[in-house]
Amino acid sequence: MGVTTPKNSFSNITINDNNYGLYLAIEGLQESYLERNYGYDHGNLYKAEGTGTNLKYTGETQSNYSGLKDNAVTSITDDDFQKIIDMIKNLNNGTNLVQKEQVAIYLPYIFLLMSLQAPTCQIAHY
């Protein structure tokens, strides 16, 4: 599908001969992820916590989305963040934004792999 993803690996955790099970280790979405996928200092990375992270359009004022802007992992400008507001506005007011064929391919994999970081899940694991 052409979507970049964090590195991951299955890890069988054993401590003092006690097996604690099989876990999925996932790379943190930080600067190293951006550098590996997009090149040095390219792209903006946001950690969504707090006000305005529900992607509901509440106007052009950037402070309405402080949970996104204040938690940016990378350095951003007001112009960079305006693109996020424009995206949120389009998500709320746009039509025909979903490519049904792509979603039909993507969703079964989410459910098959029980992806807890997928758009269908409400839990944040970071």
Image (cartoon, rainbow, N blue to C red):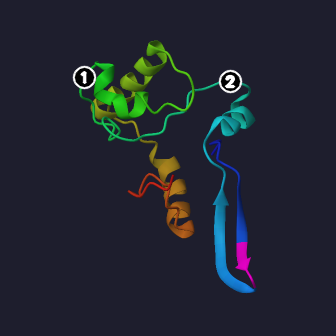
Q: What residue appears at the point 66 percent right and 24 percent down from the top-left corner?
A: 42
- Locate residue 88: give its quadrant: top left
Q: Disc 1 to disc 2, how far (Cα)? A: 29 Å
Q: Is residue 69 left or right of residue 22?
A: left
In magenta segment, residue 70: no
> Left or right: 107 with respect to 56?
right
Q: Report crowding for label 1: few under 14, some 14 to 19, many 20 or more residues within 10 A (C-alpha).
A: few
Secondary structure of residue under mark 1 = loop
Q: Which quadrant would residue 120 be assigned to in this image?
A: bottom left
Tell me the tag on residue 59: 1
Q: Is residue 74 left or right of residue 86?
A: right
Residue 50 x, y percent position in the rendering? 34, 40
Give the mark toward the camera: 1 or 2: 2
Q: Which span is picked out in magenta?
A: 12-16
Magenta segment, principal secondary structure?
strand
Q: Amino acid at mark 2?
A: Asp
Q: Is residue 117 above or below residue 53?
A: below
Left or right of residue 44: residue 67: left
Query: Residue at image x 39%, y 41%?
Result: 49
The residue type indicated by label 1 comes to Gly
Disc 2 element? loop
Going 70% across and 51% down the picture, which residue do you hit? 7
- Crowding at mark 2 (Cα within 10 Å: few <14, some 14-19, many 20+): few
Query: Which residue is nearer to you in this view: 15 or 20?
Result: 15
The residue where tag 2 is placed is: 41
Q: How many marks?
A: 2
Could you say where residue 44 lies in the image, as x and y percent from the top left?
56, 27
Residue depicted at x 29% and y 33%: 92
Q: Nearer the viewer, residue 15 or 116?
A: 15
The residue lying furthest to the front in this view is 16
Q: Nearer the viewer, residue 103 or 88?
A: 88
